[in-house]
Amino acid sequence: MKYDLVIFDCDGVLVDREPIANRIFAELINSLGYNFSYEECEGMFTGRSDNNCLKILEERTGKKPPKDLFSKFDELAFEAYERELQSVEGVKEIISLLKFNDFCMASNAPEKKIHKALKVTGLYPEFENKFFSCSMVARPKQFPDLFLYAAMKMNASPKKCVVIEDSPFGVNAAISAGMDVFGYCARTDQEILKKAGAETFNDMALLKEFLGISPVGTQHSKLKT
């Protein structure tokens, strides 16, 4: 492989959580008197931490969100994840071709949400003790803190790391951390990721070439495909 460490984002890269989350979030905030479409929620909140979402909501409306907004959201969303959440197509094959200590995950989501997503999709065995949340660092993505923390915990030099992201905030964070970044644009505007500085792809099968891996070699996977 070309890199010592592959750092995956979670939502939109490993699991297809964001369409479900954005739908539930739009329904919830509109029930509280806000007025945002699914598309607006997708554009404003995708890739953001919970705290940043609250700040954006207040800035856009002048209305302070209720303190228990994300408690209510989690309750509704977790029920939907149990019914609907799946891993991103092709990502399990990619993981199966990587050595166990050569990859991890770093996400702006809280640990509870990451844990739930990995459990429901069957990815947890691969990322146990190797997923990192923005709650572990001072600043979330778009700052480099989380990626630098993940590299440190995995004993990898940032210059030998590559990040797989689907949001411009994540791309900005990876570049600020001095890491290469590939932008997965199956659901994200390709030009936005390119403008942020990512080399883009829209099919997980292409990632094998980007990473310099192939089906021939060590396969460690604990996954059930």
Image (cartoon, helix red, strand yellow):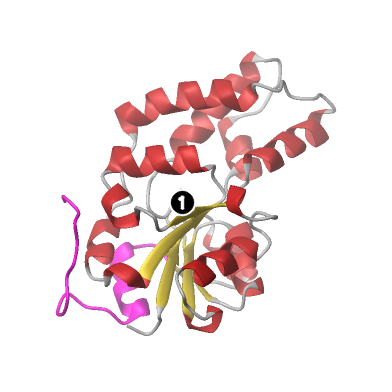
Relative to 176, does residue 10 appear above or below in the rendering?
above
Please, what is the three-letter code of the amino acid marked with disc 1?
A: Arg
Q: Is residue 167 magenta?
A: no
- The location of residue 54, given as percent across then percent down, is 71, 34
Q: Is residue 215 magenta?
A: yes
Question: Looking at the image, which is closer to me, 204 or 189?
Answer: 204
Residue 224 is left or right of residue 69, and the answer is left
Q: Quadrant of residue 129?
A: bottom left
- The location of residue 122, given as percent across then percent down, is 26, 45
- The location of residue 106, given as percent across then percent down, is 50, 57
- At x 64% / y 23%, what residue is drawn? 69
Relative to 224, does residue 115 appear above or below in the rendering?
above
Name the magenta segment's main secondary structure: loop
Helix, strand or loop under label 1: loop
The magenta span reads: 201-225
- At x 68% / y 62%, what residue is drawn? 143
- The location of residue 100, given as percent across then percent down, is 28, 68
Residue 205 is left or right of residue 222, and the answer is right
Relative to 147, does residue 76 appear above or below in the rendering?
above
Q: Is residue 185 visible?
A: yes
Q: Quadrant of the N terminus?
A: bottom left
Question: Looking at the image, which is closer to me, 10 or 25?
Answer: 10
Relative to 177, does residue 48 appear above or below in the rendering?
above
Residue 30 is left or right of residue 215, and the answer is right
Q: Quadrant of residue 39?
A: top right
Going by the picture, which residue comes out furthest to the right?
62
Q: Quadrant of residue 101?
A: bottom left
Number of other residues with Cα within 10 Å of mark 1, as a class: few under 14, some 14 to 19, many 20 or more:
some
Question: Mark 1 highlights which residue?
Answer: 187
